[in-house]
């Protein structure tokens, strides 16, 4: 009887731990139904704020372009998970940080952001895109980032 009680308490503890360890997933319908001006603001980050938060260890930059695009040019501090591979590679994302989805402009990054939001990630998209980030990281700003 004691063993059954111990196993039951242990199981309840594991369930409680797993329920609180990961943010809850949400349906696309629920995400859209709750979308407001604050959600619109919260889903974006610009290059300047991205670099600041990256230096503070708060964000993970995920370049969602195709592998060939990433190999042609990249941000050295980004990981590459192409948009079409994202569902199968969620385990590579750091749930302790805000994920920032990025592509050259923002079209694919927005799709990735919405998908990751429904999977329970804290996520934003780079509103000015990788092209603007490359422009922002010129000269002293690039040196500051890597130092």
Image: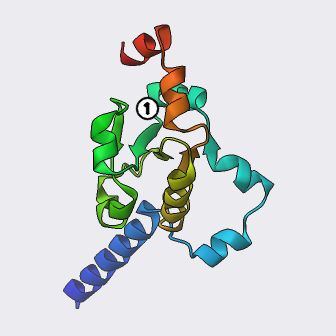
| Image quadrant containing the C terminus | top left
Question: In the depicted view, which residue is nearer to us: 16 or 123?
Answer: 123
- Relative to residue 119, is residue 54 depicted above or below? above
Q: Residue at x 40, y 44 (%)?
A: 63
Query: Can residue 122 be seen in this snapshot?
Result: no
Q: Residue at x 56, y 55 (%)?
A: 110
Q: Residue furthest left?
A: 3
| Image quadrant containing the N terminus | bottom left
Q: Residue at x 48, y 20 (%)?
A: 137
- The color scheme shown is rainbow
Q: Is residue 48 left or right of residue 86?
A: right
Q: Position of residue 131 (x, y in %)?
A: 51, 33
Q: Is residue 110 left or right of residue 139?
A: right
Which residue is disc 1 drawn over? 57
Q: Residue at x 26, y 79 (%)?
A: 6
- Relative to residue 8, is residue 116 depicted above or below? above
Q: Position of residue 11 (x, y in %)?
A: 31, 78
* Disc 1 packing (10 Å; few <14; some 14–19; many ≥20): few
Q: Residue furthest top?
A: 140
Q: Position of residue 127 (x, y in %)?
A: 61, 41
- Relative to residue 90, is residue 25 depicted above or below? below
What secondary structure is marked by label 1? loop
Question: In the depicted view, which residue is nearer to us: 56 or 89?
Answer: 89
Question: In the depicted view, which residue is nearer to us: 10 or 137?
Answer: 137
């Amino acid at each position: 009887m004691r063993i059954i009680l111990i196993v039951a308490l242990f199981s309840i503890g594991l369930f409680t731990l797993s329920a609180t360890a990961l943010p809850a997933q949400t349906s696309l319908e629920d995400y859209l139904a709750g979308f407001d001006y604050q959600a619109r603001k919260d889903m974006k980050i610009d290059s300047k704020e991205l670099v600041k938060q990256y230096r503070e260890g708060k964000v993970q930059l995920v370049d969602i372009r195709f592998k060939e695009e990433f190999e042609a040019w990249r941000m050295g501090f980004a990981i590459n998970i192409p948009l079409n591979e994202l569902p199968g590679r969620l385990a590579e994302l750091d749930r302790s940080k805000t994920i920032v989805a990025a592509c050259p402009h923002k079209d694919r990054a927005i799709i990735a952001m919405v998908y990751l939001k429904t999977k329970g990630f804290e996520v934003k998209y780079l509103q000015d895109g990788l092209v603007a980030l490359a422009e922002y990281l010129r000269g002293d700003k690039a040196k500051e980032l890597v130092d």
